Amino acid sequence: MTSEQPNEADIFNSARRIESPDERNVFLTDACGDDSGLRQRVEKLLAAFAEAYLNGLIGTCGFQFQLDISRPCFRLW
């Protein structure tokens, strides 16, 4: 039987919608299991998202945010 590896982006996108810190913590514990590296990466993403939101970079003009870490980032010059 093959167990599917948790997807960092899916966990982040679900967790960021949970307003209660206690409920979010329970969700992250369940979703990340014993993978402390995964938990740390998701928590860093959540912290960056919260900072961007508080700085007004997200949430204006109906902007919808969806993380997709499967695509590489490119700089356009």
Image (cartoon, grey):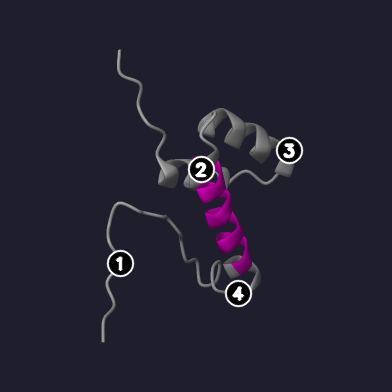
Magenta-tinted stretch: 37-51
| Residue linked to disc 1 | 73
**Tag 2's secondary structure?**
helix
- Can the viewer see residue 14? no
Q: Which residue is mark 3?
A: 22
Image vertical order of residue 68 relative to residue 56, above or below: above
Q: Earlier in the sequence, mark 3 or mark 4?
A: 3
**Disc 4 target residue:** 56
Give me the C-alpha separation between circle 1 and circle 2: 22 Å
Left-right relation of 64 to 18: left
Q: Which residue is disc 2 drawn over?
A: 37
Q: Position of residue 70 (x, y in %)?
A: 30, 51
Q: Is residue 31 visible?
A: yes
Whichever of callouts 1 and 3 sits on the residue coming sooner in the sequence is: 3
Assign a secondary structure to mark 4. Answer: loop
Disc 4 + disc 1, Cβ < 8 Å: no
What secondary structure is the stretch in magenta mostly built from?
helix
- Along the line of sight, the residue nearer the viewer: 23 or 63: 23
| Spot occupied by residue 69 in the image (x, y as percentages of width and height) | 35, 54
Q: What's the CA distance linking mark 4 and mark 1?
A: 22 Å
- Mark 1, Cα crowd under 10 Å, few <14 / some 14-19 / many 20+, is few
Residue furthest bottom as drawn: 77
Write down the quadrant of residue 34 in the picture: top right
1 vs 3, front mark? 1
> For this rendering, which residue is in front, 20 or 60?
20
- Residue at 58% x, 69% y is 52
